[in-house]
Amino acid sequence: MNTVTVGAFLAAGLVLSGRLKTETIAGYAEYKRGDTLIVEGQRVVATPSTKVKGAKRLVEIPLGNEVKATGQRNSAGVLVAQAVETRPNTNTSTEQQIIAASNEAEQTWVKEGMMFEPADSGKINKIGDLLESGPYVTRARRIMDRIRPSYVPASALRVRVVKTDQWNASAMANGAIWVFTGLMDALSDDELAIVLGHELTHYTHEHMRRQMSKGTMGQIVGTAAAIGVSQIKNATAQQVAAFGGQMGLSALMTGYSRDFEDQADRVGLRYVYEAGLDPTKGAGLWEKFRQKYGETDKITNFFTGDHSRPSDRIRNIQRQIQLNYTTPARKP
């Protein structure tokens, strides 16, 4: 039987009532605060009756492990777990293939010094030049290094800045995070951290691997192989051949399901909070997006995924703030 200290038991709040809603959260163990484990951005505690599978105690679960916890929230918004399952996060063959494809695409952009996408008639649409140094790069990389959880090494992430007036950011499965200068110009550091935290979650929670069907995976692998073809001598033609295909480059970037986009919002707020930044700026951030793009949230490039409408995102973020962030952000 799992045991906890008296302090942790008190933190669990009042005795659970059958009238309370049972909730399941699934993600990764990313922070420990005393007897509290942070999973999917949510605080989780155990009681003496909590059943823990895969570890002796809740707080002994290693950071980076996959965790599924079922329980009920107390009045402080903490999930009091009735059952917890955990297992190490493994690198599957599918994930390795997706990462290889992402590496090829990233390297092509870096080599050409610009981000682009395939267009009709064998041409390409340039999105913007890549910046390798300067204030934009310094700012974005500083914030990313501040918000990344400790179990993710700095060497696993590469923040790439694209010079363009567009508002966007995106993530690849290989740890490449892309952010546009137009968006950076419009946001404070707290707001930019929320955007980067959202994209970082796509990487840490392996959304690309989890969303890939077998058929889509075959197309991705084909794209990875095509990028390296040596028989095409013209560099531009080689790039178009590599990225054209049935899926195109967008398959390596986003297009995540709404569930994954909403999870990225939730977990991204936790990254911001643990870094000592202000997650309560999230509602204002998405109000800016609503004013710029409207309720349909259609960003006019190929990165668009199945996001909730801005109004829904604002409500979801406000709920997360009420559950988790009523106290000031921690100072690192």
Image (cartoon, rainbow, N blue to C red):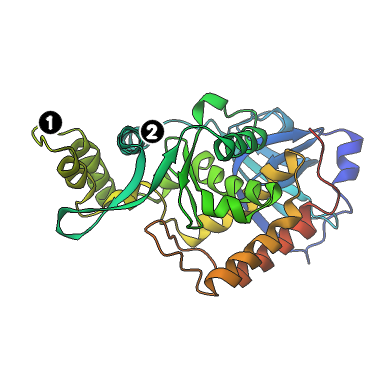
In this orientation, which residue lies closer to the viewer: 189 or 321?
189
Residue marked by disc 2: 92
Judge left or right: residue 34 versus residue 25.
right
In this orientation, which residue lies closer to the viewer: 226 or 119?
119
Residue marked by disc 1: 230
The image position of residue 108, as x and y in percent, is 30, 36
Can you say which quadrant of the picture contains the N terminus?
A: top right
SS of the residue under disc 2? loop
Q: Earlier in the sequence, mark 2 or mark 1?
A: 2
The image position of residue 50, as x and y in percent, is 74, 42
Q: Is residue 317 above or below residue 53?
A: below
The image position of residue 197, as x and y in percent, is 61, 45
- Tell me the residue at 60%/52% (across/down): 185
The type of residue carrying mark 2 is: Thr
In this orientation, which residue lies closer to the viewer: 198 or 26?
198
- Tell me the residue at 78%/63% (across/down): 18
Residue farthest along the left direction in this orientation: 231
The image position of residue 175, as x and y in percent, is 47, 35
